Image (cartoon, rainbow, N blue to C red):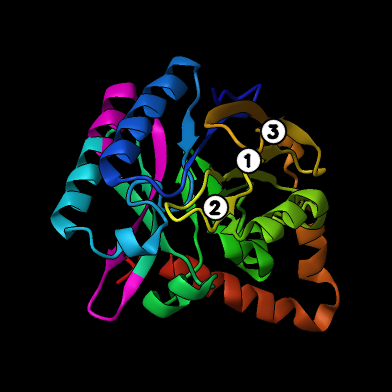
Amino acid sequence: MLTKDTPTLQVSCVQMHWAKPLAFNLQRTLHYVEAASATGSQVVLFPEANLTGYYYPYAINLDPKVIRQALDQTRAAAAANDIWTIVGTIQETCDRFLNLAHVIDPSGEIVHEYAKIHMAGRDEKQYCRGGDKLSLFEVDGILCTLIICRDGRHPELYRLPAMAGAQVLFQPSCSSDEIEAVAWKRISGRAQQPVGPNTRIFHCVANTIGQSPDGKQTSSGASFIREPSGLPLAEAGYYQEEMITAVLDLSRADRSYILDSMQHPPFLSKYWGDMIEEIRSRANIKPE
């Protein structure tokens, strides 16, 4: 809980299957919203596209009405359990699909939405387009930011919000690929790079597990919560559905590396300031 003397935030990250039907995904989501609240967490983070699933042959054929109903049920669960809830969907627009993260507050309102910027994989590149804003929002007075999976390869997407004051990065992910690529990612640690060593902020990742229906792809698991040094506070396994939880001591998220970047070299300082203002001005635009 957040107090004047001990600024902390308890976060849970849920690791789920990436290629199951929406009804199954919704049931597991509702279960973990309740479970995270029962542990005392203030925020629960779910993987990329956890409601619709990330398996595009299925997700792109979902009825938009069914997706809205699943979001409504998740909103109701967030309100019933008094917890911030971050979930994902793939939804069609007038111009292809968007890969979306929805931030739901403890009253059940969607207060922030972010569209993935950098597409990953053949199907996503075929069906989706990127969003046009960076993420900046508050959780109980704590400034936070969001990226989705592949976005993590592009540090400006979280370093700029950190310049604007964000202390916590939430990263829903679905690191799915052929088994050889996934095995290599596990060994190299490349699925999600911890951001603390270049920002000094917290990094919370909810990744996926499991195989695609055709057995050709799998996912790397290994969700984590890391503190600003990059050291792990909690880590999940490679294969099983599970929830991890940690308490974030926000006094450790001093953003010192970011503050240095804003001042040195001096000739760039003005431009950082201009970009920060642009990020803030676009933060509440609804992705469309």
The answer to whether residue 163 is left or right of residue 119 is: right
Which residue is disc 1 drawn over?
223
To which residue does mark 2 refer? 173
**131 and 111: which is toward the camera:** 131
Is 147 above or below relative to 72?
below
Q: Position of residue 115 (x, y in %)?
A: 42, 65
Q: Are marks 1 and 2 in contact (CB under 8 Å)?
A: yes
Residue denoted by label 3: 235
Query: Which residue is more in the foreground, 85 or 2?
Result: 85
Q: Amino acid at mark 3?
A: Glu
Q: Amino acid at mark 2?
A: Ser
Residue 79 among those drawn in magenta: yes
Q: Position of residue 142 (x, y in %)?
A: 54, 41
**Highlighted range, magenta:** 74-97
Gap in Å between the C-alphas at discs 1 and 3?
A: 6 Å
Q: Are marks 1 and 3 in contact (CB under 8 Å)?
A: yes
